[in-house]
Amino acid sequence: MRQGDAKRIPMAMLANLFGGGKGTHALDEGAWQAVMEQPVFDGLDGAERVRLRELAIQMLADKAFTGAGGIEVSNGMATAIAAFAVLPVLNLGYGGYEGWREIVVYPGEYLYDGEEMDESGIVHHVRHARSGEAMEGGPMVLSWQDVEHSGQGEGFNVVIHEFAHKLDMQGGSANGRPPLHSGMSPEEWAHDFQTAYDDLCRRVNGGEDTAIDPYATDSPAEFFAVLSEYFFEVPDVLQQEYPEVYGQMASFYRQYPLVRMKAMLRGE
Ligand SMILES: [Zn+2]
C-alpha cells in the first residue's frame, strides 16, 4: 500500500527486476472466462472485452509473476491478476504500466517489517500486515487471498489499488496527482480531491462510520488508490459521496462505470 523498502524482497526474486524480456505466464482461457464473470466487469460490451483481453495478454508478455511464501503462481492466477490490472487502462493503453517487471504474489497478507516515516518526518520501525504494495520504479507485491476477494462489486480490489499507485507514480512519487490528459485542469483536480480528502478526514476523525474505507485518509496517495477501487467496483457509492471526484476519475480513466452499472440494473 505504501511505498516500501525493496531490501526485504529476497535477492533470488530480483533476477527479473530490470530490463524487458519475456513474461513468465500465459493467458489461461478458463480463468479468463471465470474472472470476466466478476461484477466489476459487468456492463462491458463485446468490443471492450476484446480490448481488455488484448491488454491482459500484453501484460502477461511484459510482467514476471513470482510466487513467494510458499505458493507458485499458476497461469490462472496470473490471468486473473492481469484482468483486474488492465481494467483501469482499458481506454488509456498499456503505456502507463511499462518500465518495471516483477509482480510478487504471496498466499495471503504478508508481514511488512521495515521503516516508515510519520507526518512529522520521524522514521519508525514497524511490523504489520499488508495486502499489497507498489514500489516506485520497482516491483509490485500482492496477496493472492486479497486478489480473490477483489472484483466482487463491494468496493475492494487490491489489484486496481496497486495499479492506481503505479499510474500515480508516472508523475514521480505517489501523491494522488497522476499526470492528467490535455484538457483536464490540474487545479480543478487538486481542488476536488483536496476538498473530498479533507471532508473524509474530518468525518473519520469525528468517529463517523463512513461509506468509504477510512484507510483512504492515510494520505492523498492512498485516497486516490482507494477511491479508484470505489470508482470501478461501486461507482454509485463514489458518485453519492464525492461526485466531483467521480467526475475527475471518469475524465482520467476515460470510463463511465456508473453508466455501465445503470445499464445492467435496467437489464440491458
Ligand atoms: Zn496503497
Image (tube, rainbow, N blue to C red):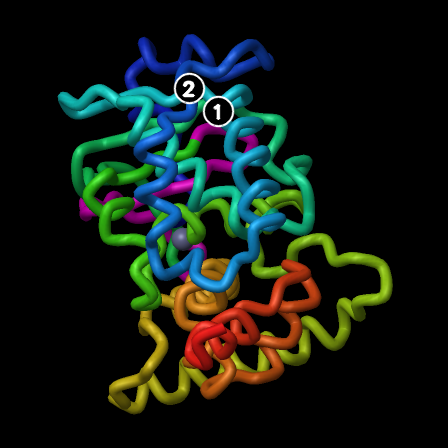
Sequence-wise, the earlier of marks 1 and 2 is: 2
- Which residue shows up at 65% across the image and 40% down it? 96
Q: Which residues are magenta?
A: 119-139
- Which residue shows up at 56% across the image and 56% down it? 45
- Quick one: label 1, few (<14), some, or many (20+) residues within 10 Å? many
Classify mark 1: helix, strand or loop.
Answer: helix
Q: Amino acid at mark 2?
A: Ala
Residue 3, percent across and down? Answer: 43, 43
| Residue 120 visible to the viewer | no
Q: Is residue 262 above or below residue 135?
A: below
The stretch drawn in magenta includes residue 76: no
- The one nearer the camera, 120 or 106, is 106
Count of numbered circles on the image: 2
- The one nearer the camera, 41 or 190, is 41
The stretch drawn in magenta includes residue 121: yes
Which residue position is annotated with label 2? 26
Quote the CA–CA distance across marks 1 and 2. Answer: 6 Å
For ligand 1, tell me if the residue under mark 2 lies within 8 Å: no
| Residue 182 visible to the viewer | yes
Q: Is residue 21 left or right of residue 126?
A: right
Q: Is residue 203 left or right of residue 73?
A: right
The extreme right residue here reads 183
Which residue position is annotated with label 1? 60
The extreme left residue here reads 70
- Quick one: label 2, few (<14), some, or many (20+) residues within 10 Å? some
- Which residue shows up at 35% across the image and 55% down it? 157
Q: Is residue 205 left or right of residue 238?
A: left
Residue 254, percent across and down? Answer: 68, 61
Residue 31, percent across and down? Answer: 31, 34
- Which residue shows up at 38% across the image and 37% down it? 32
Q: Pointers 1 and 2 in contact (CB under 8 A)?
A: yes
